Image (cartoon, grey):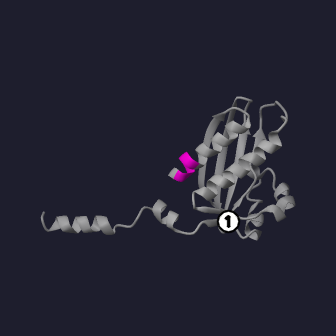
């Protein structure tokens, strides 16, 4: 046993670092962060401020993802018309991949808020590898409320507590 103990201790100190630590040490990956979309099945119709709320959510999502050190958002402003043509991205079978490739992204992030009612919504966030078109991460959460604060808190939770823990 005395001969084995030093070998075990040595193995612990030279064991590879967990994937999350290695990922943090690497450069952030160029990422096409598409605008947050709304899938509204509430029957309530468009509410004032909804478009601005989705822009706020997109900006917050971009900020949170870049803050992780794993993602670097690419500028999609010159692709606005092409991005609009891909809506709804949550149901277009990868129609957004060409935009992400042309923007020079290695990853793409898609987020959709499913509004069931003024009180109940859920949000899904997908991270895709642009080269393969495969989703490499998916996280979701439910949230309550239909205002700016609820959206911001939902994305903070989704990125900080769900995506970063994968």
Residue 136, visible in the rendered structure: no
Quadrant for the N terminus, please: bottom left
Circle 1 sits in a helix, a strand or a loop, which is it? loop
Question: Which residue shows up at 78% across the image and 64% down it?
Answer: 99
Indicate the quadrant where residue 8 lies. bottom left
Q: Is residue 15 above or below residue 91?
A: below
Image-based side of 50 in relation to 26, left or right: right
Q: Position of residue 40 (x, y in %)?
A: 78, 38
* Residue 75 falls inside the magenta stretch: no
Indicate the quadrant where residue 115 lies. top right
Indicate the quadrant where residue 18 lies. bottom left
Q: Which of the two residues, 104 or 92, is positioned nearer the viewer here?
A: 104
Q: Is residue 12 above or below residue 138?
A: below
Question: Which residue shows up at 61% across the image and 45% down it?
Answer: 156
Which range is magenta? 160-164
* Residue wearing tag 1: 130
Count of numbered marks:
1
Image-based side of 81 in relation to 105, left or right: right
Q: Position of residue 49 (x, y in %)?
A: 82, 38
Q: Position of residue 42 (x, y in %)?
A: 77, 32
Q: Position of residue 129 (x, y in %)?
A: 64, 64
**Label 1: how many residues lie within 10 Å, few (<14), some (14-19) or many (20+)?**
many
């Amino acid at each position: 046993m005395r001969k084995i103990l030093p070998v075990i201790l040595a193995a612990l100190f030279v064991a590879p670092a967990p994937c999350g630590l290695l990922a943090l040490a690497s450069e952030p990956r160029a990422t096409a962060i598409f605008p947050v979309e709304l899938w509204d099945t509430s029957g309530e119709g468009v509410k004032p401020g909804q478009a601005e709320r989705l822009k706020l959510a997109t900006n917050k999502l971009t900020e949170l993802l870049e803050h992780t050190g794993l993602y670097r958002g690419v500028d999609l402003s010159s692709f606005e018309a092409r991005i609009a043509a891909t809506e709804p991205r949550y149901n277009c079978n990868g129609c957004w991949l060409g935009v992400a490739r042309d923007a020079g992204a290695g990853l793409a992030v898609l987020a959709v808020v499913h509004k069931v009612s003024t009180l109940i919504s859920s949000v899904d966030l997908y991270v895709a590898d642009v080269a393969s078109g495969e989703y490499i991460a998916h996280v979701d959460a439910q949230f309550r409320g239909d205002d700016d604060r609820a959206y911001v808190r939902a994305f903070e939770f989704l990125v900080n507590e769900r995506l970063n823990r994968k």
